[in-house]
Image (cartoon, helix red, strand yellow):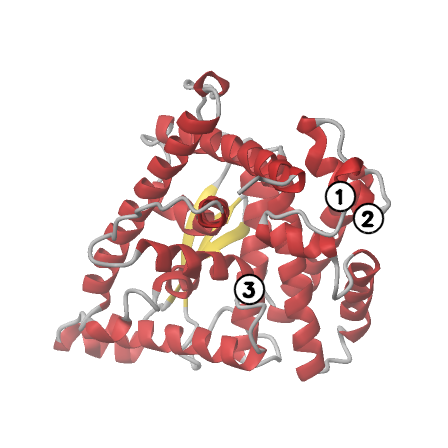
Amino acid sequence: MEISQLDRISYSILLQETLELRQVLQSIVNSQDTIDNYDIFIPFLPIMSSVCLGWCDLFTKEGIKIEIPDIEGYSCVRLLKNCRIGLKLYCDQRIGKATKQLKKNSEETYRLLKTDYNIFQRLVVSMLGQCDFGVFTINELPYGNTSQLFLYISDVINFERYKSLGVWETEARKVVFEFSKLLSQFINTIIDSFAKSNMIDKDSQIELVRFNFSYNDYFLIDEKRRNILKGDLPIEIQLQLFNILCQNNFIINVLPLVFQSGGLLYHRSRLQTYLVSVNTIKKIINKFPNEKYQKQLKEIVEVKEIYFDKDSVLRNNIFHYKIEGVDDSIFSIPEKYFYEFIEFNSRVEFNDFMQVISEEIIKINKVIYKMVEFC
């Protein structure tokens, strides 16, 4: 079957993003002595999965059969799809179903935590409590939390099969490590097959000296001792908002500053997390009207609808790596295909458009900080 010009353009954009992703992975590998790959890979998995699924969709359309091995008995394809859903944070599902799953995951985590202790330790926990929620920060900005891992892989590595959190976490770490390694190998194969390997800087490293990375434990499910997410909304709604906040911070801070990603991968990720954020906010304000923040939230939604209506060609491409609904004559420069597509659909110069997106993400973060009372 002959490939259309629009498909060729879509594949060209995907390859550029894959090269950028490969460069990030090279930097991580070169910096493995100074960076905890596990902590970094948790919020990074959705981005990797999104790019890899773009290639899987391409190969399927072209009738090319690819064999992706299972990981420790778990389906790699299912992990890919779950992690991409993780990037979207259930934005295509009803908010009620999504938040119930988040709360269930957190409660199950708390149950597993308590099963690891002896009688004396349980007595101490009954008196002092047990932290059940961890947050990763960079320069005091939250960029990841422990619920994200459960959100991405709990459908694959089921909590209920394990009697303790320690056993489950050991299994999860092993699967995440193998999954990350397999995705890296997949991306290497793509680069070797379709691009020039000399486009990758093999000596690049991540400079962490100027960044303050930290991890803190909190009480979340233990209502008497809760010291995080203490806003007025139901806890599961606050948790979903906090996941959005972490994802936003990872993409607008960690991705460009730590991983030095500033090309198409970074731009698409910003657009993806922006659309996810606004879509979630829209559903929340419809279900939980809040006079205190209603005006700010509605203004955020209104800005989004200026550029992305419900039938937006631009929105659909941002998540699916397939350009449709435009004439191929709008494209002229291969290195600028993505920029040309954005400018044609938004009617705004690319840098100006992305400046609006960045400013809106910052506005979203500010209101979420207030809504969940995180400081």
Q: How many marks?
A: 3
Three-letter residue code for mark 2? Ser
Alpha carbon distance from label 3 to label 1: 29 Å
Does the residue at mark 1 contact the one at mark 2 (Cβ under 8 Å)? Answer: yes
Specify which label sits upstream in the sequence, 3 or 2. Answer: 3
- Number of the front mark, 3 or 1: 1
Instruction: Name the residue at the right extreme.
Output: 347
Judged left or right of residue 317, residue 342 is right
Q: Quadrant of residue 33?
A: top left
Instruction: Name the residue at the front extreme.
Output: 1
Element under disc 3: helix
Label at residue 154: none
Alpha carbon distance from label 3 to label 2: 29 Å
List the residue tagged with mark 2.
346
Q: Residue at x 82, y 48 (%)?
A: 346
Judged left or right of residue 110, residue 171 is left
Nearest the viewer among 240 and 142 is 240
Question: In the rendered image, which quarter contains the C terminus?
Answer: bottom right
Nearest the viewer among 113 and 75 is 75
Alpha carbon distance from label 1 to label 2: 6 Å
Q: Residues within 10 Å of mark 1 (few under 14, many from 20)?
A: some
Residue 333 horizontal/vertical position (percent):
73, 26
Specify which label sits upstream in the sequence, 3 or 1. Answer: 3
**Height in image: 184 above or below 31?**
below
List the residue tagged with mark 1.
342
